[in-house]
């Protein structure tokens, strides 16, 4: 971790976050950053990602560090690099320098954390080696996210309260992540007509992100098989009649994420059937964004997407019946089986390491309905929240061929008509939408999403 490119406001922002935490809880907290895992020997490691809860209060992606927070005071615990470290990793900043950057009141060695664990709350870390240290320091096993109890649960709820809405420093980072992701998608569109395989487009898109010294905020999805929701294969050839679905987002050096999906035709021109379905998905996308404002229930946004997609599919003759009735029986989920989106922040599915604690309003639990069970966010929207809006249409063989679905939906699904849309395997359109006092702001709006502009852009930029 080098101390370059760090905003002058960082320590003020971190102090505000600590002060807000201190207004919500009155017990000490220890948060660990995590450590990097060796691949085969100690200096050859898997990519390191600091814990997001640590990042929120410590600001920097430090390796193998912990912070102790109490009544607004910040103590940093980390060891200075071992003498041999500079040979492999170069000179890295010392503990005292880092402490000054983040506005820590005190900087101590890790061994000094030993007697500070009793009575402190924490959040389960996701890194195994760090979880052993955590249990040792706290003198207890820390429960899994779904079983958090006592002070740990109180802490998790307080952190959710803070991280649900974004402060100015976070928003500046999120805007940067969005802008770089937009550039990556434009480069992907430009590269597609000449590319032979998905991997080439992925390389171009990630190249834009890497060139900004950022990383991807999740494993990129760049595929002609968009019906595989989190497809991580990149070997398929690109054929002129294919649609390419690219779900690629950047993550800033401080860990803040973007999450964008576009679906474009490999040839640069949608077929009439692809265009029909694309416009249905876009109508749902636009209808949802138009409704976003404080106080609106995100579940209602999801149901609006379901209804809009169902209306479109009825108009195209793929589904038969009244759209509202079809949504009641979850017929939309045959083609739109996931939720309309999720929280976005330091993680792409923000705070899902805490199960549904962040996504679901207190007292609400997941529905087991086919058309609602993957809804990741079910709470009223509030100004300062960042959410994704990502409706889609997919022909997933495992869903469409499932005998129970065949039986249940045999009277509402026109198979013959559907067969005419065989060149549409998967379409998703995903943008990052900030809830504002007046309504919303689409942070990723610089990337076009209507079919004609996408076609024009491809024609313009790929030559
Ligand atoms: N990129 C993963 C998602 O959209 O949820
Ligand atoms: Mn998403
Ligand atoms: Mn996505």
Image: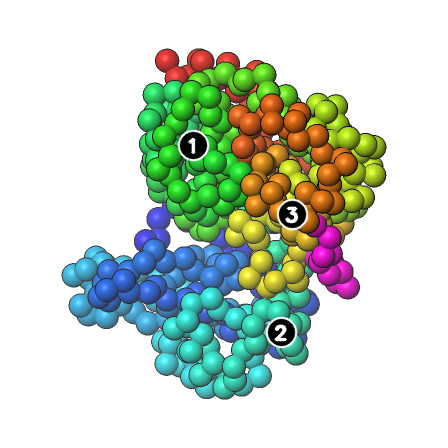
Q: Which residues are magenta?
A: 360-370
> Compared with residue 334, is residue 139 higher up or lower down, i.e. above or below?
below
Examine the image and state in which quarter residue 277 appears: top right
Please indicate whether residue 61 sits to the left or right of residue 319 in the image.
left
Name which residue lies at 49% across and 53% down.
Answer: 10
Judged by its main secondary structure, the magenta piece is loop
Circle nearer the N terminus (2, 1):
2
Specify whether residue 57 is in view. Answer: no
Mark 2 highlights which residue?
A: 147
Please, what secondary structure does the residue beneath circle 2 have? Answer: helix
Count residues near mark 1 (Cα–Cα under 10 Å), then give few for <14, some for 14-19, many for 20+.
many
Please, what secondary structure does the residue beneath circle 3 have? Answer: helix
Name which residue lies at 33% across and 26% down.
Answer: 196
Of marks 2 and 1, the one in the foreground: 2
Ligand 1 within 8 Å of disc 2? The answer is: no
Instruction: Measure how far apart labels 3 and 1 are at the Cα level.
Output: 41 Å
Specify whether residue 408 is in view. Answer: yes
Instruction: Measure how far apart labels 2 and 3 are at the Cα level.
Output: 36 Å
Name which residue lies at 73% across and 31% down.
Answer: 319
Mark 3 highlights which residue?
A: 403
The label shown at residue 117 is: none
Instruction: Measure how far apart labels 2 and 1 are at the Cα level.
Output: 39 Å
The label shown at residue 184 is: 1
Counting from the top left corner in percent of width and height, residue 273 is at 59, 20
Circle nearer the N terminus (2, 3):
2
């Amino acid at each position: 971790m080098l101390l370059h490119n760090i905003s002058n406001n960082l320590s003020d922002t971190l102090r505000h976050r600590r002060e807000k935490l201190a207004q919500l809880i009155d017990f000490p907290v220890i948060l660990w950053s995590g450590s990097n895992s060796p691949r085969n020997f100690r200096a050859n490691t898997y990519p390191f990602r600091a814990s997001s809860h640590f990042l929120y209060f410590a600001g920097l992606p430090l390796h193998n560090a912990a912070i102790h927070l109490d009544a607004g005071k910040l103590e940093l615990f980390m060891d200075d690099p071992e003498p041999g470290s500079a040979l492999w990793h170069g000179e890295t900043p010392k503990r005292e320098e880092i402490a000054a950057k983040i506005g820590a009141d005190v900087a101590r060695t890790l061994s000094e954390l030993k007697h500070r664990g009793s009575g402190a709350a924490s959040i389960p870390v996701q890194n195994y080696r760090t979880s052993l240290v955590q249990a040792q320091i706290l003198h207890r096993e820390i429960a899994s996210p779904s079983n958090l109890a006592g002070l740990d649960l109180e802490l998790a709820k307080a952190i959710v309260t803070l991280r649900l809405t974004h402060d100015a420093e976070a928003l500046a980072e999120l805007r940067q992540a969005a802008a770089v992701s937009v550039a990556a998608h434009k480069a992907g569109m430009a590269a597609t007509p000449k590319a032979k395989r998905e991997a080439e487009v992925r390389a171009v898109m990630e190249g834009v992100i890497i060139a900004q010294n950022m990383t991807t905020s999740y494993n990129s999805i760049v595929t002609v098989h968009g019906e595989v929701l989190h497809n991580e294969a990149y070997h398929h050839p690109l054929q002129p009649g294919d649609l390419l679905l690219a779900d690629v987002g950047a993550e800033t050096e401080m860990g803040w994420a973007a999450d964008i999906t576009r679906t474009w035709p490999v040839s640069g021109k949608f077929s009439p059937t692809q265009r029909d379905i694309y416009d249905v998905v876009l109508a749902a996308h636009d209808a949802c964004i138009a409704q976003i404002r404080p106080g609106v229930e995100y579940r209602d946004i999801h149901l609006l997407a379901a209804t809009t997609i169902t209306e479109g599919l009825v108009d195209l003759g793929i589904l038969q019946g009244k759209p509202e009735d079809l949504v009641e029986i979850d017929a939309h989920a045959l083609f739109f089986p996931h939720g309309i989106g999720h929280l976005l922040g330091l993680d792409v599915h923000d705070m899902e390491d805490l199960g549904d604690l962040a996504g679901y309003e207190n007292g609400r639990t997941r529905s087991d309905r086919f058309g609602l069970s993957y809804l990741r966010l079910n709470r009223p929207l509030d100004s300062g929240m960042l959410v994704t809006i990502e409706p889609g249409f997919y022909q997933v063989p495992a869903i469409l061929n499932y005998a129970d679905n065949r039986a249940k939906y045999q009277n509402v699904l026109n198979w013959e008509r559907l067969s005419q849309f065989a060149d549409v395997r998967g379409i998703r359109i995903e943008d990052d939408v900030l809830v504002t006092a007046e309504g919303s702001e689409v942070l990723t709006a610089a990337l076009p999403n209507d079919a004609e502009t996408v076609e024009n852009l491809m024609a313009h930029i790929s030559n």
